[in-house]
Image: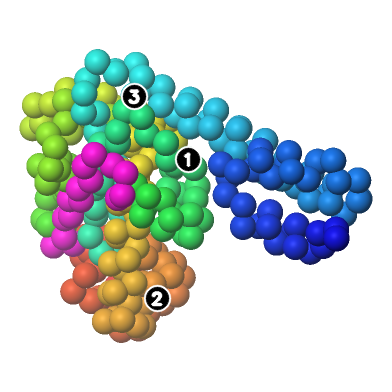
Amino acid sequence: MEEKIGSIKALLKETEDANLGAFIQMYQDDERSGVQKIVESARKRLNKLEAEKVRIEQLKFYEKKYQDYEFICGIDEVGRGPLAGPVMAGAVILPKDCDILYINDSKKLSEAKREALYEEIMEKAVAVAIGVNTPERIDEINILQATYEAMREAISNLSQQPDLLLNDAVTIPEVTIRQIPIIKGDAKSISIGAASIVAKVTRDRLMVEYDKMYPQYGFASNKGYGSAEHIEALKKYGPTPIHRRSFIKNFL
C-alpha cells in the first residue's frame, strides 16, 4: 500500500536537519509529482543547511586566526541607546569545535530565533557571563564608561578566565587580557555574535519584567528605546526609577 502524500509531507516537517539526506534518499524514486515536490523542498532545506554551515565556518575566522589561545571570549553590549533600563554586556567562551548554527548579530535575528539560540549557547558554551550597569550609574559616569564597567564585570563573572578577548568595536580600559577590537564584530565573529545574543535576550527579558511594573511605557515592546509611545508616556506620566535622567531631559 502506497504511503499517503500527506504523511510524507508531515514526516518531512518532523525530520531533523541531520536526517534530511536519508529522507531524500528514501523518497527520491517515488514518481508521484506530489512526492517529488516534497523531495524538492527537502533538497532546498538541505542546500540552505549546507550554505549555513559554510557561513558559520567563515564566522570562525578570528577564532581560527587566534586558535593558539585556548579560551577565546567574545564580548558585546546591548542597551547603550535606550532611554530606560540598564546597559548590559555579554561574555561568551565557545568550545573550539562549536557546532551551533545560525549565530549572528542579535539584531539580525527574530526574537524566536534569539531565544532558541540563547538556550543552545547556554547549554554548549564553556562559560557565559553577564555584566550590568544601572541607569543611575549611566547618569553618573556616562554611557560609554558605564558600558566599560559592565564589560569588565562580565569578564570577571566568567567561570573560566579567558586568554583572549574578541570585542565588538571597543578596547576596554583596565583589562590586562589581550584584546582584539573588531568593527561590526557581532556579524564577523561567532564568539561576539553569541555574546550579543546572550546580552540581548537577558536584557529583553528584564525589560518585559519592568513592563509589568510600569505598564504605561510599553517596555515589553520598545525595550526602553525611544518609541513614539514611550516618549508620549514619558511626557504624560513622567520618568520611572529606571529612566536615564541624562537621556530624557529633552523630552521633559
The colour mode here is rainbow
Q: Which residue is mark 3?
A: 63
Label 1: how many Cα within 10 Å (few below 14, some 14–19, many 20+): some
Q: Earlier in the sequence, mark 3 or mark 2?
A: 3
Q: Which residue is mark 2?
A: 218
Extent of the magenta region: 122-136
Residue at image point 49% right, 42% down: 102
Looking at the rendered structure, the secondary structure element under dot 2 is loop
Q: Position of residue 146 (x, y in %)?
A: 16, 49
Whether residues under marks 1 and 2 lie with C-beta atoms below 8 angstroms apart, the answer is no
Q: Amino acid at mark 3?
A: Glu
Residue 94 lies in magenta, yes or no?
no
Residue 15, relative to residue 55: is it above or below? Answer: below
Q: Amino acid at mark 2?
A: Gly
Q: Which residue is mark 1?
A: 101
Mark 3 vs mark 1, CA separation in Å: 15 Å
Instruction: Using the image as rendered, state which of residue 155 and residue 183 is in the foreground.
Output: 155
Quarter assignment of residue 83: bottom left
Q: Where's the N terminus, which quadrant?
A: bottom right
Q: Earlier in the sequence, mark 3 or mark 1?
A: 3
Left or right of 218 on screen, residue 181: left
Mark 1 vs mark 2, CA separation in Å: 32 Å
Number of callouts: 3
- Nearer to us of marks 1 and 2 is 1
Residue at image point 23% right, 46% down: 128
Label 3: how many Cα within 10 Å (few below 14, some 14–19, many 20+): many
Q: Position of residue 34 (x, y in %)?
A: 87, 54
Q: Earlier in the sequence, mark 1 or mark 2?
A: 1
Residue 128 lies in magenta, yes or no?
yes
Q: Position of residue 208 (x, y in %)?
A: 34, 72
Residue 226, relative to residue 140: is it above or below? Answer: below
Q: Amino acid at mark 1?
A: Leu
